[in-house]
Image (cartoon, rainbow, N blue to C red):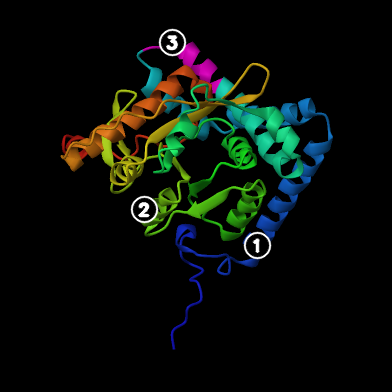
Amino acid sequence: MNDKRPDPTAPPEKRSDNRGFDIKSRLQYFIIRCIIGGLGRAFAFIPERWAYGICIRISLYAYKRLPKFRKLARKHLEIAFGNEKSPEEIEKILHDTYVNYGMSLAEFLMLPHKSREWVESKVVFDDPKFVTRACLEKGNGVVGLGAHFGSWEMVNARLGIYHYKMALIVKAQRDAIFSRLLMETRTKWGNEYVFKSRGIKEECYKQLKQDKIIGLLADQNATRNGVFVDFFGKKASTVTGPAEIAMKSGAPIVPSFPARGPDGTITLYVFDALELRDTGDFEAHLVYNTQLFTKSIEDFARAHPSEYFWWHRRWATRPPEELENR
């Protein structure tokens, strides 16, 4: 008889649920969930400037007291801007990034307890050419290219309220209960989410045939099946999914990234569809098109550096030739 119970000694990423966790871990999670829910409810009713102020202070406390993460983000900023900006300028960007993500934390906590009107007042669209609508009218769907900029949970909520026909492709959290908690917030606003799994590309093609927008985040290190393209002048292992799906389906890739304005509101900037190359040499053009969408992410990060999530280990995987020369 097969024992299908989860192995409690397995690493968290190998577990499909929390049944293998010990009582202490379950209790810790319950406490954290109560704290998050309680803070969110409190922040939803106190003056907003207090909620933002508290979360900015929490973020700046992490900036000062958690050197490991501060040094990691600074290292990545130095890779990106070390030849262009002074150490003082890089430190200013780093500080502003912590402030910005403190504000995003406040919004994430408040989001489940706020109204549709509040979300609409916080997030606006900048799509003067109606790029998304024009692409959808062609009937092949749209590959919506995103990246980890700013308060993306707020943006996703606003997109749900706008009633775009879209499916957002997301990675399940290691902790199944936390993943469910997160999804409760995300699905409140009407969005459809699809978890990454084996066969996800086929699911994307299916969604595109229904003339939907599939939302893909494509700015994290690809540990396998990636290609190396330039990101801020350094080779970065990058997922090819958006380029491959667009090339095989005929759907356009439309980049859209959010940034916070001086008044605190978030603008989602929608850019022209990328001009992909697809004339027969699939593998070569796959690399070219992956470089193309990576450049669009880099350009926005250059224009809005404090919006980007610099804690990602974007350059962790190195090309084989670099490893051989060590």
Q: Badges 2 and 1: C-beta atoms under 8 Å apart?
A: no
Q: Quadrant of residue 258?
A: top right
Q: Nearer the viewer, mark 3 or mark 2?
A: 2
The residue beneath circle 2 is 201
36 up-or-down from 158: above or below = below
Q: Nearer the viewer, residue 41 or 29?
A: 41
What is the distance, in whole Å, between disc 3 and disc 2 at their CAs? 43 Å
Left/right of residue 223 with respect to residue 137 in the rendered view: left
Q: Which mark is residue 86?
A: 3
Q: Residues within 10 Å of mark 1 (few under 14, many from 20)?
A: some
Q: Position of residue 212 (x, y in %)?
A: 47, 46
Q: Position of residue 310 (x, y in %)?
A: 47, 30
Q: Which residues are magenta?
A: 84-95
Left/right of residue 186 with respect to residue 209 in the rendered view: right
Q: Residues within 10 Å of mark 3 (few under 14, many from 20)?
A: few
Q: Dominant secondary structure of the magenta stretch?
A: helix
Q: Quadrant of residue 120?
A: top right
Q: Nearer the viewer, residue 313 or 156?
A: 156
Work out whether mark 2 precedes mark 1 in sequence or the reverse, and give the earlier one: 1
The residue beneath circle 1 is 26
- Report helix, strand or loop for mark 1: helix
Q: Residues within 10 Å of mark 2 (few under 14, many from 20)?
A: some
Q: Considering the image in quadrants, where does the C terminus appear?
A: top left
Work out whether mark 1 precedes mark 3 in sequence or the reverse, and give the earlier one: 1
Residue type at mark 3: give it. Answer: Ser
- Report helix, strand or loop for mark 2: helix
